[in-house]
Amino acid sequence: MNKVYGILVIFAASVLLGFAFNLFLLPHEILSGGVTGLAMIFGLISPINAGVWLIILNIPIFVVGWMKLGKVFIFNSIFSVAVTSVSMLYIPVMKVTEDVLLSSVFGGVLVGAGAGIIIRFYGSGGGFDVIGLLLTMKRDIPLGFLVFSLNSLVIFASGFIFSWELAMYTMASIYITGLVVDRIHTRHHKLSLMVVTSKGEAVKKELLENLYRGITVTDGEGAYSGNKVKVLYSVISRYELAFVRPLIKSIDPNAFVSISETMEVMGNFRKDNSFKKPPRAKGAVYNTTANSTEQN
């Protein structure tokens, strides 16, 4: 059911992209970013629809993504691009408003919302989204900012082909898209998690079985009660918080949990995280003894 729900969400978000392109951006020749923007340029200067160009230009990027991001991600991305392309073929290109600035703002918001939702459900709209995700696996850079930087090429291209005024509207739209994507895609946000519990062994076991994160475990004592407790510390992504919180509560409703923003993580922190822990590497050593620190 979760897979079906994810596919339906990706489908709806991809259709939303089609509406954003054909009702707000394309009628005013305001381009989206990356490969989608290039597809729009080719669609405007050639008889071939932009949706067809979108598929053609994404093929080499999907090949690289298949090798680096996995089959499920690429399947969801191909599905998203296909739905967006088909929706662009059937949704009429028409102006919702004559105001170019208003169209660039609303178009940017809708594209950012659609792209952010698709990425959150482990897919992408292809193009620079895939490249940006590959780079965020190496560096903790906000995806929206990274994609905006890559999209500067499209902005300059639109300025030479059409006009610099439209290029500036395009920059405004892409910038807004990046802001909305960063509001939805929060994987680069890291949180420090500290759990003080009398059921330390049970909590530790559940976290290790369901998350691919290291945990530091220390002995503690309540200053007022004198009760012996375990203190568990780890760094997780904001995505994982929604999963971790009910998990801890189900084991120890009385656990003291402290969650704070982490500005930077140094060391071996796994960036391509998931809520369900993949098989451990053969020969890997995981130290979870008290008073010890292990890698995240």
Image: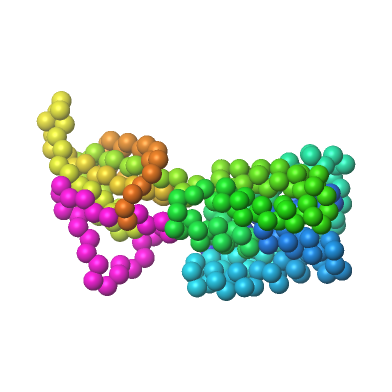
Residue at position x 14%, y 34% in the image: 221
Dividing the picture into quadrants, the one containing residue 80 is: bottom right
Q: Percent x, y for residue 178?
A: 62, 46
Q: Which residues are magenta?
A: 269-296
Q: How many marks?
A: 0
Q: Is residue 74 left or right of residue 218?
A: right
Residue at position x 50%, y 58% in the image: 135
Q: Percent x, y for residue 141?
A: 49, 49
- Residue 295 visible? The answer is yes
The C terminus lies in which quarter of the figure? Answer: bottom left
Q: Percent x, y for residue 127?
A: 63, 63
Residue sitting farthest toward the top: 224
Residue at position x 31%, y 37% in the image: 257
Vertical position of residue 146 compared to residue 221: above or below: below
Q: Is residue 70 left or right of residue 102?
A: left
Q: Percent x, y for residue 163?
A: 83, 50
Dividing the picture into quadrants, the one containing residue 158 is: bottom right
Q: Is residue 263 left or right of residue 267?
A: right
- Name the one closer to the observer, 270 or 196: 270
Colour setup of the view: rainbow
Residue at position x 77%, y 48% in the image: 167
